[in-house]
Image (cartoon, coloured by chain):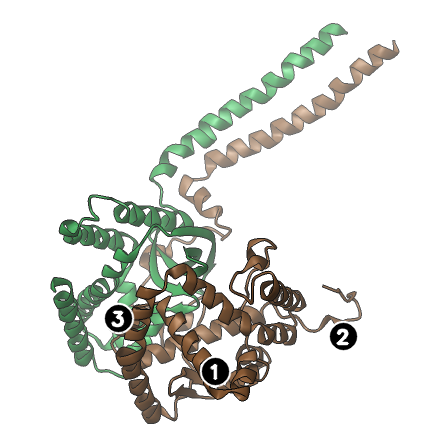
Chain colours: A green, B brown
């Protein structure tokens, strides 16, 4: 009887460890490799973006005024990895997008991107090590099966916390930001409302004017 | 023998357990082998997998299957701005007046003030002015059915007015964990189902709607500031100016940034105001449940 007991006491661990080892090897092990290369989920995408931005912004050498241009270039390059400017342009133009030729769409996207850069990148220079907390993500599908995500974050300022939600959509596995919602105010919707009453050419003119003014401001 | 029996028993139970452990692990193994990694990663999101359309997403593509507007299908919010603006010419005029007043008077004053008074003291003043409007928040939380928040705001008012030296400090948040939570009558009315009415730009006070203007009037009824103003207009006005300048000194440059980043500043502010207020109402409406008192199945909670 002692044998039986010892038999079990050995058998059980062996019986469990083998499948466990197999699971670890084939299951997790085999998955771990492609997962590291696989697209990130929305929350991880935002976390990565925040990390990349804060890394550039907290770099002491880049903070020197002489390196300002380089710092801005790096920030823009990072933004391009995480934002979907074509989608943003489309949503800003609304139904009018249909009437635009491919060339007009391309030039609008490019100018709007420049416009956003000239207005928002310089603002990042004000960053003073504020905490960014990433809360949770929610994923929804529209009736066509396209997948959209909302990642909630909090930007901690002094005695004040700002709720910033990032809206992302999935394109071929990757998640890209198509809107930023600050305290309930969607930036892309806000631009949409501003753009509505103006003609295409008028919009291009106003944006080019603003970009030029921004450049002047930076040089002075 | 009895001890032997005791020894024999666990193995039998364990045998069953090991078998089920085996089964579960085996099933897990099969699953983990059969599932492509990307699928498994997607399944974690809580959405059914199997959608491969992510890459073909193009609402304005060849077959254009979308509604009129790309936002109509947005799964988060398909509302289009519904704020009427029949007074637009007048509103645009007052918007320009306020804009000038900001750049000519308020901004330089606030900048000068910020240079003289350290930030910590300005934060104290902000707390003080915020404490003055606490009674309105107590009432509005109550009207919104948020009894707990109402009680918390009342406790904050009592604690901060006494221990916090008239509200200059915020021991209620620091030591008692009672955080400030905004509430106003315009929001309460919105939760009750009142529409925005239409957009109004007040001289000096700035953007508002018909509903929010009524709310502002209601809130001011129970504001200590109003009673001060009624008693001595000059003291009241001085406090009002002080509050405005102090608040502005803590957000220097924000208005400039909004205006600079706008293609049409008037519309930018109007829409931002509308979205901001709408969010304030919607975020509370979901929390507001029908009064529990009328629900026979649920015990009324005294919280």
Q: Position of residue B293 (x, y in %)?
A: 76, 72
Tell me the element at label 3. loop
* Mark 1 touches mark 3? (CB < 8 Å): no
Q: Residue furthest right?
A: B2
Q: Which residue occupies 57% across, 79% down?
A: B224
Pinpoint the chain carrying mark 3.
B
Q: Position of residue B191 (x, y in %)?
A: 57, 77
Tell me the element at label 2. helix
List the residue tagged with mark 1: B235
Which label's residue is closer to the chain start, 2 or 1? 1
Could you tell whether B132 is left or right of A215 in the image? right
Could you tell whether A136 is left or right of B293 in the image? left
Pinpoint the chain carrying mark 1.
B
1 or 3: mark nearer the eye: 1
Which label's residue is closer to the chain start, 3 or 2? 3
Q: Position of residue A115 (x, y in %)?
A: 21, 67
Q: Is residue B119 visible?
A: yes
Q: Which residue occupies 54% across, 20% down?
A: A18
List the residue tagged with mark 2: B294
Q: Which residue occupies 26% across, 47% down?
A: A56
Q: Residues within 10 Å of mark 1 (few under 14, many from 20)?
A: some
Residue A210 position by quadrant: bottom left
List the residue tagged with mark 3: B261
Asked whether A195 or A37 is in front, the reply is A195
2 or 1: mark nearer the eye: 1
Q: CA distance from mark 2 to mark 1?
A: 47 Å
Mark 2 and mark 1 on one chain = yes
Which label's residue is closer to the chain start, 1 or 3? 1
């Amino acid at each position: 009887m002692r044998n039986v007991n010892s038999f079990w006491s050995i058998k059980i661990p062996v019986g469990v460890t083998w499948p466990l080892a197999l699971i670890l090897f084939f299951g997790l092990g085999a998955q771990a490799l492609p997962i590291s290369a696989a697209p990130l989920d929305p929350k991880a995408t935002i976390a990565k973006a925040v990390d990349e931005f804060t890394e550039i912004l907290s770099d002491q050498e880049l903070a020197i005024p002489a390196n300002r241009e380089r710092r801005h270039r790096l920030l823009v390059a990072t933004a391009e990895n995480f934002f979907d400017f074509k989608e943003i342009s489309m949503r800003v133009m609304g139904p009018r997008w249909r009437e635009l030729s491919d060339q007009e769409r391309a030039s609008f996207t490019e100018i709007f991107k420049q416009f956003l850069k000239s207005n928002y990148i310089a603002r990042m220079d004000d960053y003073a090590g504020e905490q960014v907390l990433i809360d949770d993500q929610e994923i929804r599908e529209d009736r066509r099966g396209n997948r959209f995500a909302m990642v909630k974050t909090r930007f901690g300022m002094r005695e004040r916390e700002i709720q910033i939600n990032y809206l992302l959509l999935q394109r071929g596995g990757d998640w890209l930001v198509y809107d930023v919602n600050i305290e309930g105010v969607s930036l892309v919707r806000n631009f949409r409302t501003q753009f509505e009453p103006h003609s295409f050419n008028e919009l291009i003119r106003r944006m080019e004017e603003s970009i030029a003014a921004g450049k002047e401001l930076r040089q002075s | 023998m009895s001890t032997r029996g005791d020894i024999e028993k666990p193995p039998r139970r364990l045998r069953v357990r090991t078998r089920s452990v085996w089964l579960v692990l085996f099933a897990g193994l099969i699953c983990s082998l059969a599932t492509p990694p990307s699928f498994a990663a997607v399944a974690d999101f809580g959405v059914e997998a199997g959608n491969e359309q992510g890459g073909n997403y193009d609402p304005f593509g060849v077959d254009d299957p979308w509604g009129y507007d790309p936002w109509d299908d947005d799964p988060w919010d398909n509302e289009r701005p519904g704020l009427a603006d029949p007074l637009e010419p007048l509103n645009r005029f007052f918007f320009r007046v306020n804009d000038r007043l900001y750049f000519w008077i308020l901004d330089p004053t606030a900048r000068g003030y910020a240079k003289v008074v350290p930030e910590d003291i300005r934060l104290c003043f902000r707390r003080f002015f915020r404490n003055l409007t606490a009674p309105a928040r107590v009432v509005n939380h109550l009207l919104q059915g948020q009894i707990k928040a109402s009680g918390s705001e009342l406790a904050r008012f009592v604690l901060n007015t006494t221990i916090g030296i008239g509200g200059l400090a915020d021991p209620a948040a620091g030591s008692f964990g009672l955080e400030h939570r905004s509430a106003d009558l315009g929001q309460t009315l919105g939760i009750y189902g009142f529409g925005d009415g239409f957009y109004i730009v007040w001289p000096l006070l700035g953007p508002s709607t018909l509903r929010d203007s009524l709310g502002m009037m209601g809130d001011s009824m129970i504001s200590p500031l109003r009673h001060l103003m009624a008693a001595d207009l000059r003291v009241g006005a001085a406090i009002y100016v002080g509050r405005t300048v102090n608040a502005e000194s803590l957000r220097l440059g924000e208005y400039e940034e909004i205006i600079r980043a706008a293609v049409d500043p008037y519309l930018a502010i109007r829409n931002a105001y509308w979205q901001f207020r709408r969010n304030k109402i919607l975020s509370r409406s979901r929390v507001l449940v029908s009064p529990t008192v009328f629900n026979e199945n649920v015990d009324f909670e005294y919280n």
